[in-house]
Amino acid sequence: MRVFNEFNENKNVSLTLGTFDGIHIGHVAVIKSAVDFAQANALKSALITFKESPRRLLANEKSKYIISEEEKLSLVSNLGVDFAYEIDFSQELAFMSAEEYLKNIIAKYFSPAAISCGYDHRFGRGRTGGADFLRKMASVYKYEFFETPPQTVDGEIVGSSLIKQKLSAGLIESANKLLGRKFSIKGTIVRGNRIGGQIGFKTANIAYPNEIIKIPHGVYQAETEVRGKIYKSVANFGIRPTIKEENKKPVVEVHILDDFCSNIYGEKIIVRFIKKLRDEKRFDSLNELKDQINRDIEAVVESS
């Protein structure tokens, strides 16, 4: 997949429009609509999205993301998209009417053979553009239009806001169903205080990405991808209340199972969260902490 940070002429593509801030199963359905049309008609597929949510400019909203920019593009590429346009959302775009955006951006640069979007996609000044508008203009600009209906899981309509709510509440299993994959973070391993090693549980420590929605402090069943291989893991996110330290900051500590013993300091790992096991708590001694970690490991092994 080729990635562009500005618009260029790329005619007769199957185009998909959306913010795509989570690449959840609703987003996947929209993207696959464009990719499937392209492949069935010997065309290329293209996707337009933005580096940051337009709401950060329009509403001064400082919301967190479900996935990193790197992961978003990787997932889009895996879905078979040929061209991704990841654009800075500017004041110029913000003040364009829906008609101007369709004429001066979509038609001018892409002359699309087809346009796909979700039922709730909005664009243009005042959010006046959407599925109804694109359907109405299809005959004017000579494209086929595909609107993807709401995708539901367990009776809930899939959406990024709902997924963020569930992640913030520690409802990892439910959030993962809506995502269609495991919620994950990626980071470079840094040296910790080595307390884990002293009590028999070595950990790989990474900082929780600042731009990603925070899950509650606690202990989680997880899996860790290291050097392309995946291992069962117990992950703790929090401030390690049993350990006496000054100026403690929240950190993700991962105890990798399967007798993992490689030296991986300085390497990048991906931690995928499966479910929350318990809240983080303070123990009166390291021995009590050790006993609880053993129980956490047993819970992970039994549920795997």
Image (spheres, rainbow, N blue to C red):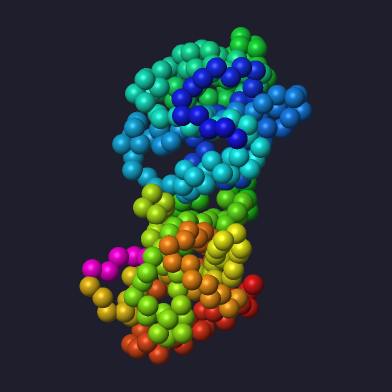
Q: Residue furthest top?
A: 140
Percent x, y for residue 219?
A: 46, 71
**Residue under the image location 27 percent in, 69 percent down:** 248
**Residue under the image location 50 percent in, 60 percent down:** 269
Q: Which is nearer the eye, 180 or 184?
A: 184
Percent x, y for residue 75?
A: 58, 44
**Residue under the image location 49 percent in, 22 percent down:** 7
**Residue under the image location 54 percent in, 61 percent down:** 272
| Segment colored magenta | 247-251
Taking 13 as reference, is 250 left or right?
left
Q: Quadrant of the N terminus?
A: top right
Percent x, y for residue 23?
A: 56, 43
Q: Which is nearer the eye, 37 or 25?
A: 37
Where 181 falls versus 94 (above or below)?
below
Q: Residue furthest left?
A: 246
Can see residue 278? no
Q: Quadrant of the C terminus?
A: bottom right
The dominant secondary structure in magenta is loop
Q: Which is nearer the eye, 297 or 102?
A: 297
How many marks overall? Answer: 0
Q: Was residue 248 drawn as part of the magenta stretch in this picture?
A: yes
Where 203 falls versus 125 (above or below)?
below
Q: Was residue 302 drawn as part of the magenta stretch in this picture?
A: no
Taking 43 as reference, is 115 left or right?
left
Percent x, y for residue 158?
A: 57, 45
